[in-house]
Image: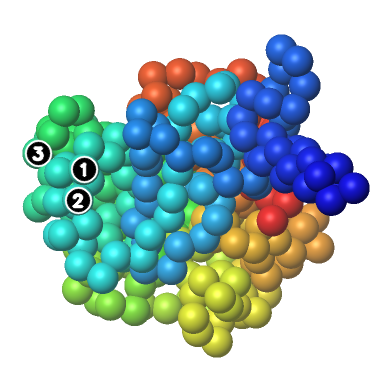
Amino acid sequence: MAGRQRKRESLHKTDRIAALRPGTGRPGGRLAFNGGVPILNKDMTLCISLSARPSNNGTRFHNHLYEQLGLNWIYKAFAPTDLAQAIAGVRGLGIRGCAVSMPYKEDVIALVDVMDPSAKAIDSVNTIVNDGGTLTAYNTDYTAIEQLLQRNAVPAAYSVLLRGAGGMAKATAAALRDAGFRDVTMIARNEEAGRALAGLYGFAWRADVDPSLTADMIINVTPIGMAGSMAGGPDADSLSFPQETVDAAKVVFDVVALPAETPLIKAGRAAGKIVITGAEVATIQALEQFVLYTGIRPTDEQVRAAEDFMRAQ
C-alpha cells in the first residue's frame, strides 16, 4: 500500500515537472508558454535587460517567443547597482544580448565597442549585441517610432509638441526629423538639455506647457503617467499635457508602456483622437531586439501571441 502511494506521488511530481519543461506534455508537440520556469542548462543562451526600475514586459515577450520557436534561450531583467560592472559581465560571461532602459541609454556609450548608425546618429542606446566579446550598440526605439508614424499615416505637415529630453526623446526627435516633420516644439524643464536637443534637430524649445499651447500631435516622452511601481513618484495619475492641449490635438502619442492605458491615452481616447500607445512602441522595439539577438524574425502570429502574453500580466 505504501509502495503504491509513493509511486502515485512520484508520478504526480513527474507530471508537474513535465508541465514546466519545454517540449514535453504531449507526443511530438510543445506546450504553450505559461510562465513556467524553463529547465536551465549549460548550453542555454542568456539575454538580459538593464533598467533602474525593471518591468516584466521584455521578459515575458522574449521568453514567450523563445518557447514558441523552440529556442534554448532565456531572458532576465536586472536593476544594476554598477553599470560598468554589469556591461563587463555581459562581455565576460558571453551574454548574447542586453536591452538598455532609462536612465542608462547614454551612459553605456562609453562601455561598448561599436556604435551602429541607429545609435550613433542620436547618441542613445537601447540594445547591445555581444559577438564573441565585441559589444555593438543599436537603437530600436527609433525604429519603433518611425514605424508607428507610418502606420498611423501622420502627416509630416502636422505641428508637434514633444515633451521630454532623455534618450527616448532623442530617438523620437530623430524619427520626427527624418520623417519630414519641421514644426516641432520640444518641452523640457532643463533648459540646457532642452535647448541643446532642440537645436540638434532644428526644433524649437520651451520650458513647460500651458493650456494655451496646442499642436496637431502631442507626444509624451517623460515618466508622467507611468505606473507607480515603475516611476516611483506621485505622477502615475497625472496628465502629461493639459486637457485643453489634448482636446486641440489630432494625434495623442504616449511612449509610456506601463500601463498601456495611461492617463494621457485615456484622455485622448475619450476626446476621440487618434492614439498611439507606449505598449505599441514596446512591442516593436522588443521585436527588433529579438531579431538582432537571434537572427530570426518571428511571424506576425507569433508576435501577436507574445504581445498578448506580455500584456496579460
The kind of secondary structure element at disc 3 is: loop
Q: Distance from label 3 to label 1 (Cα)?
A: 16 Å
Q: Is residue 308 something one can see in this rendering?
A: no
Residue under the point 60% across and 50% down = 279
Q: Give the secondary structure at mark 1.
A: loop
Residue 50, compared with residue 61, is above or below; it is: below
**Residue at mark 3 to residue at mark 2: CA–CA distance:** 14 Å
Instruction: Say the numbered circle drawn on residue 252.
Output: none
Dot 2 corresponds to which residue? Answer: 89
Question: Of label 3 and label 1, which has the lower sequence position?
Answer: 1
Residue that carries the numbered disc 1 in the rendered image: 93
Task: Find numbered disc 2 in the image and state the secondary structure of the residue it sits on.
Answer: helix
- Evaluate if marks 3 and 2 touch, with contact meaning CB atoms under 8 Å apart: no
How far apart, in angstroms, are the residues tagged by discs 1 and 2?
6 Å
Q: Position of residue 293 (x, y in %)?
A: 36, 29
The residue positioned 15% from the left and 44% from the top of the image is: 92
Location of mark 3 (residue): 113
Relative placement, left or right, of 10 versus 239 is right
Nearer-N-terminus badge (3/2): 2
The front one of 18 and 133 is: 18
113 relative to 214, above or below:
above
How many numbered callouts?
3
271, 77: nearer the viewer: 77
Q: Name the spot of residue 66 as percent of width and height, x first.
A: 53, 30
- The kind of residue on which mark 2 rests is Gly
Q: Disc 1, disc 2: CB below 8 Å?
A: yes
* x and y percentages locating residue 164 in the rendered image: 39, 66
* Image quadrant containing the C terminus: bottom right
